[in-house]
Amino acid sequence: MEFNIALLKGDGIGPEIVESTVRVLEKTAEKFGHKFNFTPYLIGGCAIDATGIPLPQETIDGCLASDSVLLGAVGGPKWDDQPGNNRPEKALLGIRSALGLFTNLRPAQLYPALRSASPLKDEIVGDGFDIMIVRELTGGIYFGDRGYREGKYGQEAYDTEAYSVTEIERIGKVAFETAMKRNKKVCSIDKANVLESSRLWRKTMHELSEQYPEVEYSDMFVDNAAMQLVRDPKQFDVIVTSNMFGDILSDEASQITGSIGMLASASLGAGTRGMYEPIHGSAPDIAGQNKANPIATILSGAMMLRYSFGLSDEADAIENAVNKVLDAGHRTADLMGTANGTPLTCTEMTEKIIEVL
Ligand code: NAD
C-alpha cells in the first residue's frame, strides 16, 4: 500500500526525532512491501523565522492533502517574546482545529524493562499498568469565549467552558469503542459537583454507556482522579475527559511511567487522517546534541500505522522492536536513571530498533 505523510519537524529536538522515525517507517515499509512518501512542512518557531507566522497556510494545505501527519515538537526560548497569538505553540491549536482533530489518544504504559524509572513504589505499580487517556481536543475552555471586562474588583480576565451534547457524544463513542478493543472499562472524569458543563457531560456519558452493556462504566470527579492515578493506577483502563482535565491528567499519567521520552500520542477526527506526535516538548536544553530519546516519536509512528492506515501487524512489529531493544538493556540518557555505562545517542537508539526490525 502507498501513503502520503506530512512531516512537521518543528523546533528543538523535533528534526532529530522525526528523522529517526522516518528511518524506522522506511524500514517497516521495506519489510512489509509498502511505500510511504514524506513531505516536510514548516510549523512553530522555524515557520515564524521563515514566514513570520507559526502556521503558514501552505502547511495546513499540505496536511489536508496528506493521508496523515507526523509532528516533532514546537517552541523554544528564541520565540518566548512573541505575542500570545503568534507563539509557536499557537500553531498546535490551529492545526488540530484545521484538521478537525477532536480526539487525543494518549497511552500511559509502564514498560516492564523501565519499571525502576517510575516514581511510584513497587507495591503500587505491581506488574505494571496500561491506561489509555481519551481527551476531547477541540472544545471546552481552551476554545471558549474569553476576554477582559470590568468585574467586582476592577478589571478581570475570563475564559469559558462550554460543551454540547454532540461534542460529548462523539468523544464518548471513541472512548467506548476503544475500551471494546481493550479491557472493556471506561471511567469518565468531570467536575459535576460544581460545573454545569460537567453535569451535561456526565448525563450524556451515562446515556451513551447504555449502548455499550459490555463495558464497565464509572465516573469520577477530577480531583479524586488526580489522587487515584498515583494511589492505584491499575484500576484504570480507558479514561475519557474534557480538554483541560485531559491536558493535566495525561501529563500526570505520563509522569508515573517515569519516562517522558517514551510516550506517544494520536490526535484523530472523523476520518482516518490523524496527527501523531510525542507528548514531550522540543527539549531546547538538549537540541542538536544527538541526545534525544526518539522512542516516543517512533511509537507515535506505530500508532499512525495502526489508527490511520489500518496496518496493525506493522505497528506491532515496531512496538516489539522497541520492547526488545529495551529488554536488551539499551538506554538513551533520559532512561539511564542511576545505571552506569554510556547512554546511546538518538542515532544509535534508532539503529538498534532498525536492526531488530
Ligand atoms: P520538554 O518536554 O521539552 O522538556 C522537559 C524535560 O524533558 C527537558 O529536560 C528535556 O530535555 C527532557 N526531554 C523531553 N523530551 C525528551 C526526549 N525525547 N529525550 C530526552 N529528554 C527529553 O518541556 P519544556 O522544557 O517545558 O518545554 C520546552 C519547549 O517545548 C517549550 O517551548 C514548550 O512550549 C514546548 N512544548 C511543545 C510541545 C509540543 O510541541 N507538542 C509540548 C510541550 C512543550
Image (tube, rainbow, N blue to C red):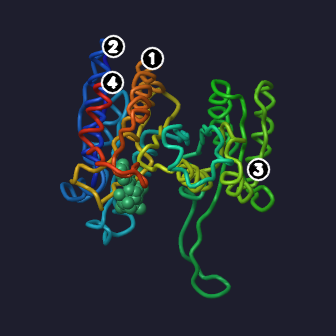
Residue of label 1:
313
Closer to the chain start, of discs 2 and 1, is 2
Q: Position of residue 307 (x, y in %)?
A: 48, 27
Q: Earlier in the sequence, mark 4 or mark 3?
A: 3
Residue 285 in which image quadrant: bottom left
What is the spatial separation of the Cα atoms under label 4 and label 2, in whole angstroms? 14 Å
On-image quarter of the C terminus: top left
Q: Amino acid at mark 4?
A: Val
Location of mark 4 (residue)? 356
Badge 4 crowding class, 10 Å Cα cut-off, few under 14, some 14 to 19, many 20 or more, is some
Q: Position of residue 13 (x, y in %)?
A: 28, 51
Give the residue at the far front of this rendering.
340
The residue sitting at 55% across, 41% down in the picture is 110
Q: Nearer the viewer, mark 1 or mark 3?
A: 1
Q: Are marks 2 and 3 in contact (CB under 8 Å)?
A: no
Task: Tell which circle, 1 or 3, labels the residue nearer the N-terminal end.
Answer: 3
Which is in the foreground here, disc 1 or disc 4? 4
Residue 220's disc is 3
The residue tagged 2 is 32
The image shows residue 320, relative to residue 261, as above or below, that is: above
Is the CB of mark 3 within 8 Å of ligand 1? no
Q: Quadrant of residue 226?
A: bottom right
Q: Residue at x 57, y 84 (%)?
A: 155
Q: Amino acid at mark 1?
A: Asp
| CB within 8 Å, label 2 to label 1 | yes
In three-dimensional space, the C-alpha distance between marks 4 and 3, rounded to whole angstroms, equals 42 Å
